[in-house]
Each structure stands twice: as structure tokens, then as C-alpha cells.
Amino acid sequence: MDTMKLLLGATVALLLGALAVSWQDMTRGVSNASPDEIARLKKQVAELRLEQDKLQFEKQRQQLMTSAPFTPTPVSNAAEIEAMKAELTAGKAKLAQIETEKHNAARDAKVAQDEEGLLSQRDLEKGDGELRRARMIAEALLIGRVSEYVEDAEYGGFITFDILMPEQVQPGTILAIRRKTGILGQLKVSDVSAEGGIANPIPGFGPVQPKVGDELILPPQY
């Protein structure tokens, strides 16, 4: 297509040159030519010059298109989108890592605080046996809860209780009744079944009677 246009342009240029020569010869030596012939020749020259201008314009337009800035293709756009997705994923991963580090830092700070508090507690307990005893009672595992207390003047009464940790309870097990950080007294388990257990107060239980909801624990070893 471009080669044909160049050839056509060259042909037009040659024709223009020939017409120019003919026009000069005519103006110099053919002064007796008719006005119609002169007008026809002028019209041909004008048409050829117009065609030459069109060809020149087309040539310039082709040159501009050849040197035009690069326009991203769908492939390059897809590559840019994938790169942005990768950056977004990396940003999310970094944010998750920061959140994890914050959580770990808070956890470590709490552990350090708890350890510091525990050490301070131990230091206090060295000079206060009752403080140590209260802590051990408070930390003892909950084994069961009193569900009923039956008074018996002859046998000293007994309790029925719900068992929360069956693996820790069997006939003969010694349990203690805990209220807050104190122990009211101790009982000995006499019977264990699927419905619960029965326990009898050990001599020296004390004047305070058990009540529904009292906590049963294994007596701490002070």
C-alpha cells in the first residue's frame, strides 16, 4: 500500500514537472493558444498539485502513526493487574504478621506481669503462712458441689454431692469443703454412683454446717 502511494507520488511529481515545462514553453512560444486550452492546462496543474498535497499529508500521517507513543496491550494490562494483586497480597500478609506480633507482644507482656506478680506473691508467702495457705486453697481443683446436707444426730449427718471430676472420686477419698479461700472441714466419701456421691464429716469438722452449693476440693498439702 505505501509503495504504491510512493510510486504514484513520484509519477505525479514527474507529470507536474512536465506540465511546468509545457506551460513555460507555451507561455514563451505559443502566445496564440486559445483561452480554453490555457484554462484546461491550468485546471490539470491544479488537480495534480492537489493530489500531491493529499499524498504528502498521507505520508506525514503514516510517519506520525509509526512514531506514536506505545499503547498498552491487553497482555501488558493483565501483567500490571497481576502485579497489583501480588502487591495487595503481600500487604495483607504483612498486616497479618504485624497483628500476630502485636498479639504475641501483649501475651508476653501479660506472662511477664503474671510471673512478676507470682514472684511477689511467693516473697510475701515466705513470711506469711496463712497467705500461702489461702492461695493453695483458691487454686485447688473443683471436684464436686454439695447438693444436699442431711442432719443425723446419731451419725453426725452426711452430704450428697454432684461429682464434677469422677476420676478423682472413689469410696474412701477425703474431700474438703471450700468457701472462698477457707476450708470449713473435711469429709470422707462413703459411696459413689452415676447419680453422685455420699460423704460423711470427719471428726473435728467444726460448728459450721455444709450448705447447698459448697465447693468440694482435694485438701491441699500445705
Image (tube, rainbow, N blue to C red):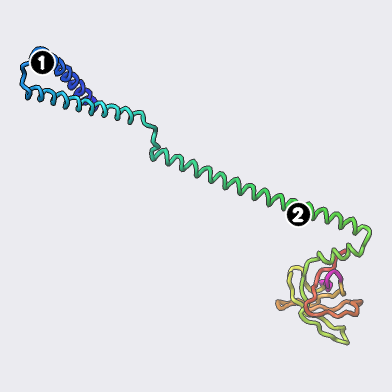
Q: Is residue 103 above or below residue 28?
A: below
Residue at x-position 39% and y-position 36%: 71
Residue 52 left/right relative to 26: right
Identify the amino acid type marked 2. Answer: Lys
Q: Secondary structure at mark 2?
A: helix
Q: Where are the magenta residues, as a range?
A: 173-182
Q: Is residue 77 above or below residue 196?
A: above
Residue at x-position 90% and y-position 78%: 206
Residue 43's tag is none
As for residue 181 lying within the magenta part, the answer is yes
Q: Give the CA distance from mark 1 to mark 2.
A: 111 Å
As for residue 194 lying within the magenta part, the answer is no
Residue 26's tag is 1
Q: Earlier in the sequence, mark 1 or mark 2?
A: 1
Residue occupied by mark 2: 110
* Residue 77, horizontal then vertical, whole percent: 42, 40
